[in-house]
Each structure stands twice: as structure tokens, then as C-alpha cells.
Amino acid sequence: MAAARPILGRVLPGSSILFLCDMQEKFRHNIAYFTQIVSVAARMLRVARLLEVPVLLTEQYPQGLGPTVPELGAEGLQPLTKTCFSMVPALQQELDSRPQLRSVLLCGIEAQACILNTTLDLLDRGLQVHVVVDACSSRSQVDRLVALARMRQSGAFLSTSEGLILQLVGDAAHPQFKEIQKLIKEPAPDSGLLGLFQGQNPLLH
């Protein structure tokens, strides 16, 4: 019997969607590397718009946690409000309306709460989840690390923003490559990942 073919986790614009989770004002001073996380998520949003990848945005209890921060650049997106610690219930109708969808690119906060639970719900629907590790964080770096490990154990792909951007564009001959090249010319800002991944970290092996 032939061995089962591994799931490679390729992402293509026509079968992908970008999820932006709860990057709101009240989190600004509590989430580790918040400014850097939002900067990377904004880069992902600009690329999604250039490549016509659909984007969905949520806000967790905005009456108490405030609106999405302006530096995300999400003007024109209608945020869907939620109280659940997963994006999926609020986005159920959008997901059901996209039968071609295969891959979800996931950015936002917090890793151990809405990002983890969204990942599990999406995997349960049979979708591939690509957690943009340099665009996800938590108040606690321990929670962030363990959440990333937990998502990987459950079958999600851990990817950097630039790795996903280059998969989406696919070819330097792409008509939008020059614009995208401008966005990734400078490396993504440091969001503390080296401290999580360095050495023989048993949670990520």
C-alpha cells in the first residue's frame, strides 16, 4: 500500500482567505510586541488586497475593548463583532459561501485564546490553517509559545509573513510582484520569535 501523501500546505490566492483577529485599542499596551504584530498584519492586508485575496476582520466586544487600531489599515473592511473566543461562529456565513476555500491565513491576538480556538474550529471544518507567527501574540510569551506548539500539534502550519507572501505571489513575473517587493524589501520587525524558537525548545519539536 502506498504511503499517504503528506499535506504540503501550499497557499494560492484563489483558494485562500486572510483572517484579522481582534487588533483593538484596549490591547495596545497589554499585548507583547503589539506594534510589531500590527505592522506585520498590515503588510499581510496590503498584499491580500494586491492579490485579491478576501479578508475578514473581527472585533472582540468592541464596546469594552475599543475599535480596530488605525495603523492596521483596515479602512473599507466591515468588522464583525463577537464575544466568542473564536472567529468562526461570527464568520460562519462567510465561510459557507466560499466552497473553493482551502487555506486560512491567520493574524491577530491572543494566541492562546481566539487564535488557538479559531485554528481548532477551522481545522475541524477541514480547512488548512497557516498561523502567521510574526503577526500573532499574547500578553504572556509563555502563553504565546505554548499556543503555537498546540496549534502545530493539531495540524496547523506555522509560517512567517514573508514566507506566505512569496507563496501567494508565486513568481517574480507576477504583475503585482514589483509592488509586493516594495512591501517586503525591509524584513518584518522583530516580534520576539527568536527567543521562543532558539535552542532545542521541546515544545516545537
Image (cartoon, rainbow, N blue to C red):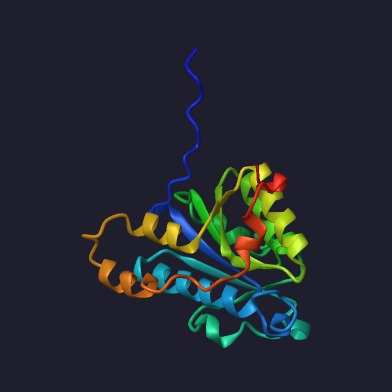
User: Is any atom of residue 117 visible in this view?
Assistant: no
- Determine which quarter of the picture holds residue 70: bottom right
Residue 37, position in %: x, y?
59, 73
Residue 148, position in %: x, y?
67, 54
Q: Nearer the viewer, residue 100 or 48?
A: 48
Check the image and report above or below for 74 versus 41.
below
User: Is any atom of residue 159 visible in this view?
Assistant: yes
Q: Residue at x 44, y 49 (%)?
A: 100
Check the image and report above or below for 70 versus 100.
below
45 on left or right of 82: left
75 on left or right of 91: left
- Determine which quarter of the picture holds residue 186: bottom left
Q: Residue at x 66, y 73 (%)?
A: 22
Screen quadrant of the C terminus = top right
Q: Residue at x 62, y 46 (%)?
A: 123
Q: Nearer the viewer, residue 45 or 91?
A: 45
Could you tell me how many numbered marks the image carries?
Answer: 0
157 on left or right of 110: left
Residue 177, position in %: x, y?
28, 66
- Seen as rendered, the residue at the extreme front is 199
- Determine which quarter of the picture holds residue 109: bottom right
Check the image and report above or below for 1 versus 121.
above
104 on left or right of 100: right
Q: Residue at x 41, y 61 (%)?
A: 165
Residue 138, position in %: x, y?
72, 68
